[in-house]
Every structure is written in structure tokens, then in C-alpha cells.
Image (cartoon, rainbow, N blue to C red):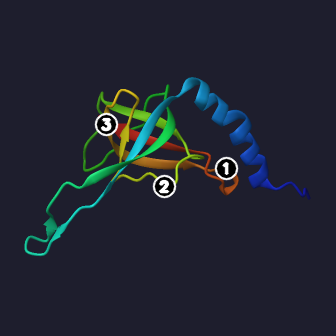
């Protein structure tokens, strides 16, 4: 039996391999989280689209394309992208109610979020997004 701490091993792999590669080949981006909606008790809905707060991150577009993903019976489109996001600087967990903004200011709907978390340590987030 080994006394190696798996979280320490994966943290070392994240800091020594994954993050330098994301810094070298990735781009500055942001996860946009909606906040500030106002509930209307008469209609039962929200009265304003709300404000989005930007959480900066480093990201990389996937080179392997996307797998078939659906949201609301909508198939993958030409504008669907797979994005890998550095989890080490994010103070939030991305969700399907959030948006992804790339370095050019293009905003994407997040269809699916999958953590890459070997040994229970979230190293990256894999997002399936649509423009």
C-alpha cells in the first residue's frame, strides 16, 4: 500500500502540466453568471434579464469536436463548440444557466458542464457551448 496523497499528485500534474499548457496555448475568457433578476409576483416570472458578472478564466477550444449533445431537443449545430476551462482560478462552478465569453467577445450558451477531476480534484471544466 502506498502512502502517496492522490490529491497532491493531481495538484502537481495540474500545476506542472495542465496549467502551463493552458497558459501557452489557451486564451483569456470569462464565465458569465447571471445575477440580479427581479421576481414579479403578479406574473410569476422575472421582470428583468438581469446582470451578468464576469469570472475571468483561461480556456482552450477543443480540437476533437463535440459529441452529440442536446438541450431542449436541439441537436448539435455548426456553432456548437467544446471548450476546456482552467478550474484553478475560478471561484464558481460553471453551470448551464451561465454563459461563456471568448477572447473576441463572442458569447456562448453553455449546454453541458463536465468536471475533469482525477482523484476528486477538479483540474478543468469541459464545456459544450453554442453560439
Residue drawn at (63%, 29%) of the image:
21
What's the distance in space between the residues labelled 2 and 1, CA to CA?
19 Å
Q: Where is residue 129 drawn, in percent x and y?
A: 37, 39
Q: Residue 92 carries which label?
A: 2
Q: Position of residue 83 (x, y in %)?
A: 46, 35
Q: Which of the two residues, 24 or 120, is positioned nearer the viewer here?
A: 24
Q: Name the residue under label 1.
A: 118
Q: Nearer the viewer, mark 1 or mark 3?
A: 3
Q: Residue at x 32, y 38 (%)?
A: 108
Nearest-to-viewer mark from 2 and 1:
2
Per the image, the residue denoted by label 3 is 107
Identify the mark nearer the N-term, 2 or 1.
2
Q: Distance between the residues labelled 1 and 3?
A: 29 Å
Where's the N terminus, which quadrant? bottom right
Report crowding for label 2: few under 14, some 14 to 19, many 20 or more residues within 10 A (C-alpha).
Answer: few
Judged from the image, the secondary structure of the residue bearing numbered disc 3 is strand
Amino acid at each position: 500500500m502506498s502512502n502517496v496523497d492522490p490529491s497532491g499528485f493531481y495538484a502537481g500534474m495540474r500545476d506542472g502540466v495542465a496549467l502551463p499548457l493552458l497558459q501557452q496555448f489557451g486564451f483569456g475568457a470569462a464565465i458569465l453568471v447571471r445575477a440580479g433578476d427581479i421576481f414579479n409576483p403578479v406574473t410569476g416570472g422575472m421582470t428583468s434579464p438581469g446582470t451578468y458578472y464576469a469570472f475571468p478564466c483561461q480556456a482552450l477550444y477543443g480540437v476533437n469536436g463535440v459529441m452529440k449533445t442536446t438541450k431542449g431537443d436541439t441537436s448539435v449545430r455548426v456553432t456548437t463548440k467544446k471548450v476546456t476551462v482552467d478550474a484553478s482560478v475560478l471561484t464558481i462552478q460553471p453551470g448551464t444557466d451561465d454563459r461563456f465569453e471568448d477572447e473576441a467577445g463572442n458569447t456562448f450558451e453553455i449546454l453541458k458542464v463536465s468536471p475533469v477531476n482525477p482523484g476528486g480534484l477538479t483540474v478543468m471544466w469541459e464545456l459544450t457551448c453554442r453560439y
